[in-house]
């Protein structure tokens, strides 16, 4: 009976997604419900003016994110990297791994793009694919190292990926500040060649075709995970590694593959962020944050690559509207509050499912 349930979990992603969508929506509603009270406190609303405060919050977030064409396009600048990092985290989660190193893999993709983008005399038809390939390789290597250690030695991927994050940050800053690619007297690399820049949608915004690339990647990864043998094995290892091994699936191979895929997509996100938005790598006093936000994106999307798109839009819109919130007298920390409550409720759903599975196993064992 338990094996039948696990087989259904692997082979019926659409029905599972429909059943799972209610809880993320509920978590969003609760997050907004709670955050309105802080809006009331910040702006001096009376206790009977709850719905007025709710309307104020909604209108401010909407106007700050999608109020006009320029704001909508600029919101996409925040959304695009979150799509990549959300998918990257989702792949690792599907294999039962916690790739907290997506941040470092994203940074390595940025650095590789900043260096490859300096190559002169190339056609855009050659240069842009070269930058994307460079991002894939850089991210894959940075994730493959902890993936290999996890698969072959059994070391914890969380600890290793955290360390790789900092190694990536320090290596990136060395290249940006002290290598031959550094600009004397400036804390950045030179601007990349025009042939390495991704096409922007409009001159009024930095939004570019990386958004389309991200959507195509989401569709491709969904197909890979649910329509191919490779994806079946990755998901089988994530659901029950011992059962997967009993069925002839190589656990080590799939752990390494999942981490490499995860890192490759994060690397593409970093590479396209340089190629489409920044056009140069700048001194990183801290992590960009897209990799860590990608964890929340993946959790809200229930690790569905396609669902990472609307999830990224939600988190991107919240981040994009933070300035408008401050101008309207609402603390920008309200954004982090909403995000935190969403994550807590989504994580609670995973905990409930975990104990539910344990109960089913006990019933099965006790007969």
Image (spheres, grey):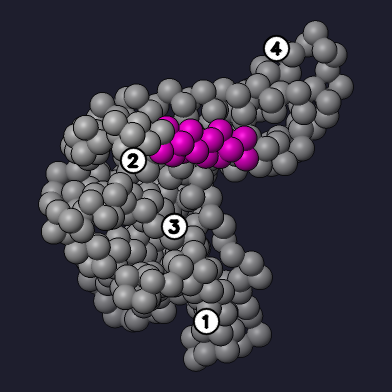
The answer to which of 335 and 365 lies nearer the viewer is: 365
Q: Label 1 to label 4, Cα distance in Å? A: 50 Å
Span colored in magenta: 340-358
Residue found farthest to the front: 366
Question: Between disc 2 and disc 4, whose residue precedes?
Answer: 4
Q: Is residue 95 above or below residue 70?
A: below
Judge the density around disc 3: few (<14), some (14-19), many (≥20) Cα neighbours within 10 Å: many
Q: Is residue 247 left or right of residue 290?
A: left
What residue sits 55% from the left and 28% below the top? 28
Residue mark closest to the camera, 2 vs 3: 3
The answer to which of 189 and 78 lies nearer the viewer is: 78
Question: Between disc 2 and disc 3, whose residue precedes?
Answer: 3
Q: Label 1 to label 2, Cα distance in Å? A: 32 Å
Residue 171, numbered label: 1
Judge the density around disc 4: few (<14), some (14-19), many (≥20) Cα neighbours within 10 Å: few
Question: Between disc 1 and disc 2, whose residue precedes?
Answer: 1
Decide: marks 1, 4 in contact (CB < 8 A)? Answer: no
In the rendered image, the quadrant that contains the N terminus is top left
Decide: marks 1, 2 in contact (CB < 8 A)? Answer: no
What residue sits 53% from the left and 74% below the top? 163
Q: Label 2 to label 3, Cα distance in Å? A: 15 Å
Secondary structure under badge 3? loop
In this figure, which residue is indicated by the disc labeled 3? 98
Q: Label 2 to label 4, Cα distance in Å? A: 33 Å
Q: Is residue 190 left or right of residue 137?
A: right
Q: Is residue 27 left or right of residue 366?
A: right
Residue 51, numbered label: 4
Residue mark closest to the camera, 1 vs 2: 2
């Amino acid at each position: 009976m338990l094996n039948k349930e696990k087989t259904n979990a692997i082979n019926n992603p659409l029905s599972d997604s429909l059943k799972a969508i209610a809880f993320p929506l509920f978590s969003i509603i609760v997050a907004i419900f709670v955050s309105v009270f802080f809006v009331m406190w910040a702006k001096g609303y009376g206790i009977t003016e709850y719905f007025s405060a709710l309307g104020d919050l909604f209108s401010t977030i909407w106007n700050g994110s999608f109020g006009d064409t320029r704001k909508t396009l600029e919101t996409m600048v925040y959304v695009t990297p979150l799509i990549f990092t959300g998918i990257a985290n989702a792949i690792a989660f599907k294999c039962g791994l916690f790739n907290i190193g997506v941040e470092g893999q994203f940074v390595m993709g940025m650095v590789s793009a900043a260096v490859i983008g300096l190559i002169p005399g190339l056609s855009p038809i050659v240069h842009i694919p070269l930058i994307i390939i460079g991002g894939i390789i850089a991210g894959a290597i940075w994730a493959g190292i902890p993936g290999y250690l996890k698969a072959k030695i059994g070391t914890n991927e969380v600890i290793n990926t955290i360390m790789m994050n900092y190694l990536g940050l320090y290596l990136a800053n060395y290249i940006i500040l002290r290598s031959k690619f550094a600009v004397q007297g400036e804390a950045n690399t030179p601007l990349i060649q025009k042939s390495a820049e991704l096409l922007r949608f409009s001159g009024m915004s930095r939004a570019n075709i990386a958004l389309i690339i991200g959507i195509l990647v989401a569709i491709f990864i969904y197909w890979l995970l649910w329509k191919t043998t490779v994806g079946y094995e990755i998901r089988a290892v994530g659901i029950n590694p011992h059962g997967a091994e009993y069925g002839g699936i190589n656990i080590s191979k799939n752990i390494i593959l999942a981490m490499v895929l995860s890192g490759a997509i994060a690397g593409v996100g970093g590479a396209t962020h340089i190629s489409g938005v920044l056009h140069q790598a700048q001194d990183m006093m801290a992590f960009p944050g897209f990799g860590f936000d990608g964890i929340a994106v993946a959790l809200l999307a229930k690790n569905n690559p396609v669902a990472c798109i609307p999830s990224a839009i939600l988190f991107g819109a919240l981040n994009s509207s933070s300035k408008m919130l401050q101008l309207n007298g609402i603390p920008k920390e309200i954004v982090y509050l909403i995000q935190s409550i969403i994550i807590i409720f989504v994580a609670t759903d995973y905990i409930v499912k975990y104990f539910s599975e344990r109960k089913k196993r006990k019933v099965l064992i006790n007969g």
